[in-house]
Image (tube, rainbow, N blue to C red):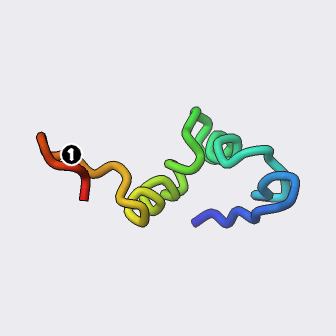
Amino acid sequence: MHTVTVLDVGYAWDGATYPSLSRVAHAITGTKWNGPRFFGLRERAEAATGAGRERVEGRPPT
């Protein structure tokens, strides 16, 4: 488990400050990641707003 602290100037993790969650994810994994997706924030936001639902032909999204 990794703990990231949100700061006014970015994000703190493991004693260092990073400008974005993507940079934190890169520091953790060594590969490029979308930070919000890596930390599971995208899925939570999509679930809360209903974004990402498939649209049924001829019907508006519910």
Which amino acid, mark 1?
A: Arg
Q: Residues within 10 Å of mark 1 (few under 14, many from 20)?
A: few
Which of the two residues, 52 or 20, is positioned nearer the viewer here? Answer: 52
Rendering quarter of residue 22: top right
Q: Position of residue 46 (x, y in %)?
A: 41, 56
Residue that carries the numbered disc 1 in the rendered image:
55
Task: State how many labels appear.
Answer: 1
Helix, strand or loop at mark 1:
loop
Give left or right: position of 34 versus 55.
right
**Image coords of residue 13 (percent x, y):** 76, 57
Q: Residue at x 12, y 42 (%)?
A: 58
Figure quadrant of the C terminus: bottom left
* 37 left or right, relative to 61: right
Where's the N terminus, which quadrant? bottom right
Q: Is residue 59 above or below residue 14?
A: above
Answer with left or right where residue 55 lies relative to residue 29.
left
Residue farthest toward the right in the current orientation of the protein: 9
- Which residue is found at the position 25% from the left and 52% from the top? 61
Which of the 4 quarters of the picture holds residue 27?
top right
Q: List the single residue furthest toward the left.
A: 57
Q: Position of residue 36 (x, y in %)?
A: 56, 50
- Considering depth in this image, is 9 or 49 the residue closer to the camera? 49
30 vs 62, left or right, is right
Q: Who's the residue at 55% across and 40% down the image?
A: 34
Image location of residue 54, percent across then percent down: 22, 47
